[in-house]
Amino acid sequence: MNGIKNRLGKEKGNWAEEIPMVLWSYKTTPQTSTKQIPFSLTYGTEAMLPMEVEVNTLRVANKDEESKAQDLRINLNILEEKSEKSGMRQAAYKHATERYYNQRVKEKVFRVGEYVLRKNEAS
């Protein structure tokens, strides 16, 4: 989120043009909680820049249609396993975050009859 704020903050009036690039970078960056790329988890394949297809880079030029289809089938078979692993990583990350937070919380027990400060806007 800080990257998004920094990028859009620099572009005062042109933030609408920057949003697609910021979202693309977010979708193709491994996330802390899952250690996976959101694009890969969604589509089951590695993301390619549009420029790679237009310029016809080595990654695109050396593949024929049959090998592309075979790679896609393999990636789709692996997708469910990747999704399960990322779900387990995310649960472990949440547990670690919860444990970190709970270490710093000081428990306070209130007894009947004690006065407590209560804000009206919170109730």
Image (cartoon, rainbow, N blue to C red):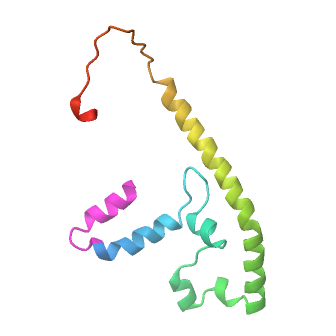
Q: Position of residue 63 (x, y in %)?
A: 72, 88
For residue 18, what is the image quadrant? bottom left
For residue 23, what is the image quadrant? bottom left
Q: In this rendering, would 114 be left or right of 33?
A: left
Q: Nearer the viewer, residue 110 or 71?
A: 110
For residue 75, what is the image quadrant? bottom right
Q: Position of residue 60 (x, y in %)?
A: 65, 86
Name the residue: 25% across, 74% down.
14
Marker count (numbered): 0
Q: Nearer the viewer, residue 100 or 118?
A: 118
Which quadrant: the C terminus? top left
Which quadrant: the N terminus? bottom left
The magenta-colored residue range is: 1-15
Q: Nearer the viewer, residue 83 or 14?
A: 83
Q: Is residue 70 above or below residue 112?
A: below
Q: Position of residue 84 (x, y in %)?
A: 70, 56
Name the residue: 29% across, 74% down.
16
Which secondary structure class fits the magenta region best?
helix
Name the residue: 77% across, 86% down.
67
Q: Is residue 122 above or below residue 22?
A: above
Q: In this rendering, would 91 be left or right of 16?
A: right
Q: Is residue 4 magenta?
A: yes
